[in-house]
Amino acid sequence: MAGNIKVVVCKDADEVARKCAGMFVEQVRNKPTSVLGFATGSTPEKSYAQIAKLAKAEKVSFAKVTSFNLDEYWGLDGDHDQSYRYFMNEQLFKHIDIRPWNTNVLNGKARFPEIECRAYEEKIVSVGGVDLWVLGIGNNGHIAFNEPGSPVDSRTRLVSLTQSTIDANSDGRFFKVAAEVPRCALSTGIGTIRDARKLVLLATGAKKADAIAKAVDGAFTPDVPASLLQDHPDCTFILDQEAASKLKK
C-alpha cells in the first residue's frame, strides 16, 4: 500500500459506523473543546446516528465543540431540504448538545462567494485548526467537491461539479433527477482538508472499490483527489469488505 494511510476493514457498513463514531466520541472525551470536521452524503449517516447514540450512552458532551462542514451547494440556503446545513441539522446537530452557533457550514446563498470562502478559511485558523475530519469519497475519487484535477494545495472556493458527480447525486437518494442538482458548490480545498490533524475517510459498497484502490495503492495524483491523502501523518480509511475488495493484499 502506498503512503501512510492506515486501512481498517470492517465486516459491514454498521461496523464502519460504530468505529467512526468511537473515534469522534473519544476525541471529544479527551478534548471537550475539539474542532471537528464533518461530511455529508449517504455514507456518514449511520456514523452520525452512532455518534449521537454513543455520546448519550457515555455522557460525552459536545457543548464546547466547534464544527466545520466540507461543502455546500451553491444557490441553496440552509432551509432547503437538500442543503448540507439542513442535512447536518437533521442527521446530527439536533441529536447532540452541540451549540448551533458553533456549527459552521458554508453559506450557499452568499452574495460574494470569494469573500465567504476566505472568511471560512480564516475562521478555521482562528479556532486553531481542525482536530478530526471525516470524509467520504466519490466514485471518481473526489473528496468534498474537489473533483479530479484539483490541486493538492487548493483552498475553499467555488467549484463546478462534474457530470459524474451530478449523476451520482440524482439517483433518488437526494435529488430525483439530474436537472435538480446544482451545477456548482462551495467546497473546502484539498489543502484545507490536509491541514487537519487527523483524517478518517469512510467508504462502503462495491461501487467505491475502484476509487479506494486507486487512492490507497495508486499514484499520488490530482487525477484521484483522495490519493493526495497518502502522505498525511494521521489518515485512516475505514471500509467495509466490499469497498476494500480491490486493495492489494
Image (cartoon, helix red, strand yellow):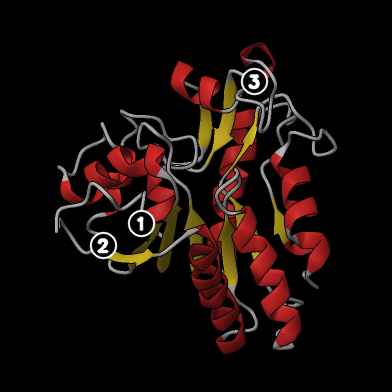
Disc 3 secondary structure class: loop
Say if 174 sits above or below 240 in the image: above
Question: Which residue has dot 3 on it?
Answer: 182
Label 1 CA crowd tier, 10 Å (few <14, some 14–19, many 20+): many
Separation of marks 1 and 3 at Cα, in angstroms: 32 Å
Counting the numbered discs, the total is 3
Q: Earlier in the sequence, mark 2 or mark 1?
A: 2
Task: Name the element at disc 1.
Answer: loop
State left or right for residue 39 relative to residue 82. Answer: left
Q: Position of residue 102 (x, y in %)?
A: 74, 63
Residue at the image position 62 percent from the left and 46 percent from the top = 119
Which mark identifies residue 5?
2
Q: Quadrant of the N terminus?
A: bottom left
Disc 2, SS: loop
* Residue type, mark 3 in image: Pro
Q: Earlier in the sequence, mark 1 or mark 3?
A: 3
- What kind of residue is marked 1? Gln
Q: Quadrant of the C terminus?
A: bottom left
How much space separates mark 2 and mark 3, taking CA atoms? 32 Å
Q: Residues within 10 Å of mark 2 (few under 14, many from 20)?
A: many
Tag of residue 147: none
Q: Residue at x 64, y 83 (%)?
A: 32
Q: CB of mark 2 within 8 Å of CB of mark 3?
A: no
How far apart are the two marked residues, 2 and 1, measured between alpha carbons?
Answer: 17 Å
Q: Position of residue 127 (x, y in %)?
A: 59, 67
Residue farthest toward the top in the current orientation of the protein: 179
The residue carrying mark 1 is: 241
Point 43% across, 43% down: residue: 137
| Residue 112 image point, x, y percent | 67, 27
Q: Is residue 174 visible?
A: yes
Q: Nearer the viewer, residue 101 or 207?
A: 207
